[in-house]
Image: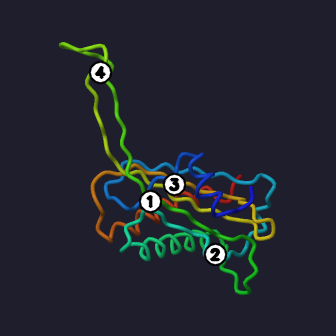
Amino acid sequence: MKYSPLYHHWKLIPIAGILIALLVEVGGCTTLEVKTDYLKSFDFNKVKTYSWYLNKSSTIGVYPDRMKLVAGAIKAAVEKELGAKGIKPSATGKSDVLVVYHAGARTKKEQEDWGYKYGLHTPRSTGPYEQVTYRQGTLIVDLIDPTSKEVVWRGIANAVMSGSRPPTAKVKPRIQEAIGEMFSKYPPR
């Protein structure tokens, strides 16, 4: 697939059902689900250097006072994981892969109808239901072939969270955990 920020933000993310919220915006994360995918024809053994795909990464719905913190934590975590895999930042500007991330935030509501009725109900009334409001987060990291501009590897971390904004001290470890788990599946086999 060719890389296009517009495609990723408004086509790919809703299709995957994951443009929701940043993993670390809220404390008390209850689940962390990580998936990866890759282009089967790409030779990952040749990847030795990377560069950031400038001005293509994004954070949507992140608390404004945390934008720099979140962006810095994501970049630091990705750089740490790539370094651990022996992939170094490009010194010449020409690299084997480009790196880009996308993160978003959204509050979601779900309603569960328990499906039974009691008492005096009219045909149009419903039985009892439960409504739950929560934040769900997604962080996507893409590795892109700089020549073809195709996404060759993608890590996606989703989390459902509870509570309110975490203390800043909890933000970086949550990002590192999510990205660490993503890159535990790199290189693909």
Say which of 176 and 70 sits in front.
Answer: 70
- Give left or right: position of 100 versus 2: left
Between the residue at mark 2 and the residue at mark 1, the CA separation in whole angstroms equals 20 Å
Between the residue at mark 3 and the residue at mark 4, the CA separation in whole angstroms equals 36 Å
- Give left or right: position of 57 versus 143: left
Query: Mark 2 is on which residue type?
Result: Trp
Q: Residue tagged by mark 4?
A: 126
Q: Residue tagged by mark 1?
A: 22
Q: Earlier in the sequence, mark 3 or mark 1?
A: 1
Bin the neighbour count of mark 3 within 10 Å (Cα to Cα): few under 14, some 14-19, many 20 and up.
many
Q: Residue tagged by mark 3?
A: 157
Between the residue at mark 3 and the residue at mark 1, the CA separation in whole angstroms equals 9 Å
Q: Position of residue 100 (x, y in %)?
A: 61, 68
Q: Tell me the SS state at disc 2.
A: strand
Q: Position of residue 128 (x, y in %)?
A: 25, 24
Query: Mark 3 is on which residue type?
Result: Ala
- The numbered dot on residue 52 is 2
Q: Earlier in the sequence, mark 3 or mark 2?
A: 2
What quarter of the picture does the N terminus occupy?
A: bottom right
